[in-house]
Image (tube, rainbow, N blue to C red):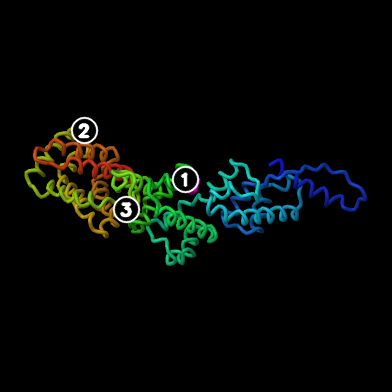
Amino acid sequence: MQSFYCRFCAANWSEQHSNKMTMELDVFVGNTTIMDEEVYQLWLDGYTVFDAVKVRIDGGVMEECEASADVLLSDTMDQYRTFQMCERLLHSPSKLGNQLLFQIPPHRQAMLIERYYTFDDAFVREVLGKKLSKGTKKDLDDISAKTSVTLKSCRRQFDNFKRVFKVVEELKGPLVENIRQHFLLSDKLARDYAAIVFFANNRFETGKRKLHYLTFQDFAFCAGQLISNWTVGAVDSMVEDMDVDLDKEFLQDLKELKVLITDKDLLDQHKSLVCTALRGKTKAFTEMEANFKNISRGLVNIAAKLTNTKDVRDFFLDLVEKFIEPCRSDRWTAADVRLYLTHYNNSAHILDTFKHQVVWDRYMGVIKGCIFKMYHD
């Protein structure tokens, strides 16, 4: 703020004393590019120069620096030009540290990059799972109106999603690490972008009314679970598209789990074990016992159908319809859900004739994690 203040004061002093023949002025010369973080955020948010000036005036910057409106306008325009010149470098962040045009300290470079790639949750929620194509980009006007995110900011965010997707889709190695290394993002932001890439690649349905209650962070958490456990990269660390595509061999193996619902003796034995473990531990026990078979069929059928592309896309919708909604209608608490799924998962290990424990654990580990996150009391 000190350099920002001095620039304003010097300009303002010049205005007030321009009619004098002689002046005394202390001058500080440096080559570090001056960037005001507040102005940078206004530029990122899609404000015009004049709207940005109004925001700054309303924030009291003129009183703080004793500057005129003309000086404030000039300063804002100057900074906007700097940001626009930097923008092409931000498209490939590693170039920012190697260029000589702007002298920007490393910590300031990190701020510029992180903020440029930061996105609005309301915006990403609207495009999550959609194809990152021209067709989706045509809808940005409507999305801007719906989310109150400026059209300019919507375009920047969408182009960032598309740029990251294109860069990492051809790379080997862990998705999050590739994003972090190529775009120099924080771990949290890199993980969020990994979720966006993963959803765009697999085209998961997120827009249906029944899914509206779920936030981007709900979906991002679930994406992390799927990436870590159900992709090829979960078992082989250096294969093509390792963290983008689901492991087809694993999805095929999931069909073996159908024995849990097609073998009547196994189904009855599983129910008995689960109900014995739950009895006396929850007020929802009666409903759990009565609906066990329907709930088990729902969870196992989701697994058995994941070899079909459409059923993969409907994965989250199926979790809501076949598990979350029935439990909500019976007024299960989040604690009830956690208790039930824990015993439902563990009891399968005791079943005498059930021989698919490894596949079961790989499947149920993700199912439990996703449902725990998606089940909002």
Disc 2 residue type?
Lys
In percent of width and height, residue 230 lies at 28, 47
Q: Residue at x 24, y 43 (%)?
A: 364
In percent of width and height, residue 177 lies at 42, 44
Q: Which residues are magenta?
A: 180-184
In percent of width and height, residue 182 lies at 48, 48
- For disc 3, the neighbor class at 10 Å (few under 14, some 14 to 19, many from 20) is some
Q: Earlier in the sequence, mark 3 or mark 1?
A: 1
Q: Residue at x 37, y 50 (%)?
A: 214
Q: Which residue is mark 3?
A: 245
Name the image quarter holding the C terminus: top left
Q: Is the stretch drawn in magenta largely helix, strand or loop?
A: helix
Instruction: Say which of marks 2 and 1 sits in front.
Output: 1
**Residue 92 tag number:** none
Disc 3 residue type?
Asp
SS for tag 1?
A: helix
